[in-house]
């Protein structure tokens, strides 16, 4: 069965040589090859402001430059986020993007008093986090408990109803051989074909 897939490239560096771009493209190509419908957003190509106040977050308008992206989030059945690990978590640009598009009225709704805190508006969707890092991936998982990624999964994606959220971590990327990188690209193509 065909799925609607959104691939979000969260690397702030617009260089086409970034591994994140190759991984995202491989996933998208694999998905399209077997008939899934794919949209792609590259955050490095967008200009948008950071949110600075609760008032902006709760009552402000999504910037014009992100309206199409917010619509794509609502459209997608499966969202793939591809980004590098920076200081143990996602880059600030990706966090700022999520703050803009995962707003009240778009991703969740506040409930009236006495009815609980919030209602998720993106239920029924799944996601995959594809993360590149300089350290070995097992060290991040075991020693650091995947802290930054766990926060993204629980505090943002699960909160708005996106479950399950799967993870693919690629470690020691700076010193990876061409053969290793090719293997990672092929792995992403296979994941895209399966739309998971």
Image (cartoon, grey):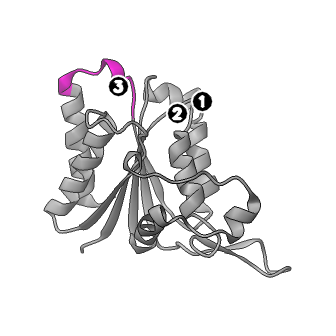
How crowded pointer 1 is (Cα within 10 Å; few <14, some 14-19, many 20+) is rated as few
Task: Give the residue drawn at x 56%, y 41%.
Answer: 92
Q: Is residue 107 magenta?
A: no
**Closest to the observer: 152 or 25?**
25
Q: Pointer 1 and pointer 2: residues touching (CB < 8 Å)? A: yes
The residue at which mark 2 appears reads as 141
Q: x%, y% of residue 159?
A: 62, 63
Mark closer to the chain start, 1 or 3: 1
Q: Of helix, strand and loop, which one carries label 3?
A: helix
Q: Pointer 1 and pointer 3: residues touching (CB < 8 Å)? A: no
Q: x%, y% of residue 106?
A: 57, 73
Q: x%, y% of residue 104?
A: 65, 71
Q: Is residue 117 found left or right of 136 in the rendered image?
A: right
Q: Of helix, strand and loop, which one carries label 1?
A: loop
Mark closer to the chain start, 3 or 2: 2
Task: Give the residue drawn at x 46%, y 68%.
Answer: 67
The residue at which mark 3 appears reads as 173
Q: Which residues are magenta?
A: 170-179
Looking at the rendered image, the quarter that the N terminus falls into is bottom left
Q: Of helix, strand and loop, which one carries label 2?
A: helix
Q: x%, y% of residue 112?
A: 80, 82
Tell us which disc is closer to us: 1 or 3: 3
Question: Does 78 appear above or below 169?
Answer: below
Task: Give the residue drawn at x 17%, y 68%.
Answer: 35
**Closest to the observer: 74 or 70?**
70
Compute the Cα span from label 3 to label 2: 16 Å
Compute the Cα span from label 1 to label 2: 6 Å
Compute the Cα span from label 1 to label 3: 18 Å
The residue at which mark 1 appears reads as 144
């Amino acid at each position: 069965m065909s799925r609607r897939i959104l691939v979000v490239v969260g690397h702030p560096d617009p260089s086409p040589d970034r591994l994140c771009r190759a991984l995202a493209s491989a996933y998208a190509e694999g998905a399209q090859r077997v008939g899934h419908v794919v949209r792609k957003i590259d955050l490095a190509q967008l200009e948008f402001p950071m949110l600075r106040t609760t008032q902006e977050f709760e009552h402000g308008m999504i910037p014009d430059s992100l309206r199409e992206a917010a619509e794509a989030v609502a459209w997608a059945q499966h969202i793939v986020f591809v980004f590098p690990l920076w200081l143990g978590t996602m880059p600030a640009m990706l966090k700022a993007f999520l703050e803009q598009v995962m707003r009240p009225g778009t991703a969740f709704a506040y409930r009236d008093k006495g009815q609980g805190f919030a209602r998720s508006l993106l239920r029924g969707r799944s996601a995959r986090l594809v993360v590149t890092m300089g350290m070995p991936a097992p060290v991040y998982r075991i020693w650091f408990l995947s802290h930054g990624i766990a926060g993204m999964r629980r505090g943002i994606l699960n909160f708005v109803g996106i479950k399950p959220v799967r993870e693919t971590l690629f470690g020691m990327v700076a010193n990876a051989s061409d053969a290793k990188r090719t293997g990672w690209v092929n792995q992403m193509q296979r994941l895209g074909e399966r739309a998971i």
